[in-house]
Image (spheres, grey):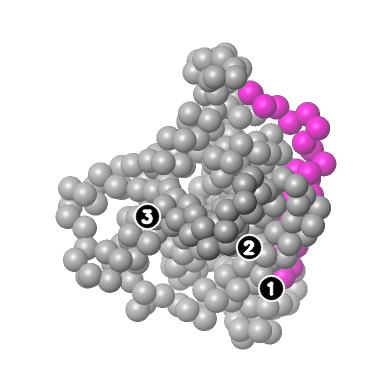
């Protein structure tokens, strides 16, 4: 592991530690039935910063230049993996409508920016970083949207009452579309199609708001650790970390190589992307739906700590395969 990646890992843990200190010292207030500082911070990220980032990213996408075969080699197995995790969790937790989708996004959504970008740059140089950035450009749009739609469907099915199927379907579609993740993506795609671009002032405003996502989410991890703790959550967190660090890249590697014909640097980039530890967006998701905050937080911490070993494993395997 290079010095640059080690420094990035250290910076992540220091920022999380600052959030933990803020939570322990109750700088944002006490947690009570009527007040939850972690949820307030999560709502700020979910309703302000993340939508700004998603909208700006979607508007600025140049679909004509994206490496679609490489993108498919990552996203097809990743989405199949997430659907499989969701189905398994639905069987186990049919009575808890928000749990399956929350565990699904935790097992599938990696730290593609804070850790992924410096790792791609250090390992593969500018050509590999360009491939990684192309995947990142669709990462949140794709892997946030799927569990969002799934959880809204589950919540609609679990809602009490005797509404007709048509009424339930309309309500579900409305909830899924008018959502702080899905709506900015749809609006961004619509604006992208106009070809008008963004006014410099609007672009700078959105860039400033989007730049807050990383530090706010890292601080939120620490605050959630302080308020919720990890007692009783470690078993589930370890399982989710294993899925993210080992099972997902083990699926992406053969599908990308033998299914889509990737080799060399593109194959290495997509496998390393799949092997990244749990990102911070799953915690915002968990906060949004009020479930598994402790387990998701523990998954982020455990998978990030274990990443040094698991990354070495995958890089060694890629070298053995001659990639």
Toward the viewer: 119 or 250? 250
Q: What is the spatial separation of the Cα atoms under label 3 and label 2, in whole angstroms?
A: 25 Å
Task: Please give the label number shown on residue 274.
Answer: 2
Query: The C terminus lies in which quarter of the figure?
Result: bottom right
Looking at the image, residue 64 lies above or below residue 30: below
In the figure, residue 160 lies in which quadrant?
top right
Task: Please give the label number shown on residue 184.
Answer: 3
The location of residue 25, given as percent across then percent down, is 57, 13
| Residue at the spot 77% in from the left edge and 36% down from the top edge | 233
- Specify the segment rendered in magenta: 226-252
Label 2 close to label 1 by CB (< 8 Å): yes
Q: Which residue is mark 1?
A: 253
Q: Closer to the observer: label 3 or label 1? A: 3
Q: Main secondary structure of the magenta part?
A: helix
| Residue at the spot 66% in from the left edge and 84% down from the top edge | 259
Label 1 CA crowd tier, 10 Å (few <14, some 14–19, many 20+): many
* Of pointers 3 and 1, the one earlier in the residue sequence: 3
């Amino acid at each position: 592991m290079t010095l640059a990646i080690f420094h990035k890992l250290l910076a992540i843990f220091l920022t999380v530690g600052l959030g933990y200190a803020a939570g322990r010292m109750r700088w944002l207030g006490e947690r009570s039935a009527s007040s939850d500082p972690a949820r307030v911070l999560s709502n700020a990220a979910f309703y302000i910063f993340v939508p700004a980032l998603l909208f700006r990213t979607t508007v600025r996408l140049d679909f004509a230049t994206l490496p679609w075969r490489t993108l498919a080699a990552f996203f097809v197995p990743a989405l199949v993996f997430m659907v499989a995790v969701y189905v398994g969790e639905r069987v186990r937790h049919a009575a808890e409508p928000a749990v399956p989708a929350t565990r699904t996004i935790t097992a599938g959504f990696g730290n593609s920016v804070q850790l992924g970008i410096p790792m791609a740059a250090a390992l593969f140089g500018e050509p590999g970083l360009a491939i990684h950035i192309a995947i990142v450009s669709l990462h949140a749009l794709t892997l946030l949207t799927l569990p969002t739609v799934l959880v809204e469907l589950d919540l609609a099915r679990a809602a009490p009452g005797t509404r007709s199927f048509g009424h339930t379907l309309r309500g579900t579609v409305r909830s899924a579309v008018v959502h702080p993740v899905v709506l900015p993506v749809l609006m961004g795609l619509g604006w992208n199609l106009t070809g008008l671009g963004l006014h410099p002032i609007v672009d700078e405003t959105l860039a400033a708001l989007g730049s807050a996502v990383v530090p706010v989410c890292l601080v939120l991890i620490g605050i959630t650790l302080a308020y919720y703790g990890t007692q009783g959550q470690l078993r589930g967190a370890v399982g989710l970390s294993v899925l993210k660090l080992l099972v997902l890249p083990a699926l992406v590697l053969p599908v990308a190589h033998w299914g889509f014909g990737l080799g060399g640097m593109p194959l290495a980039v997509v496998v390393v992307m799949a092997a990244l530890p749990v990102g911070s967006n799953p915690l915002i998701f968990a906060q949004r739906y009020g479930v598994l905050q402790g387990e998701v937080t523990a998954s982020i911490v455990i998978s990030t700590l274990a990443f040094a070993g698991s990354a070495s494993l995958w890089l060694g395997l890629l070298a053995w395969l001659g990639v």
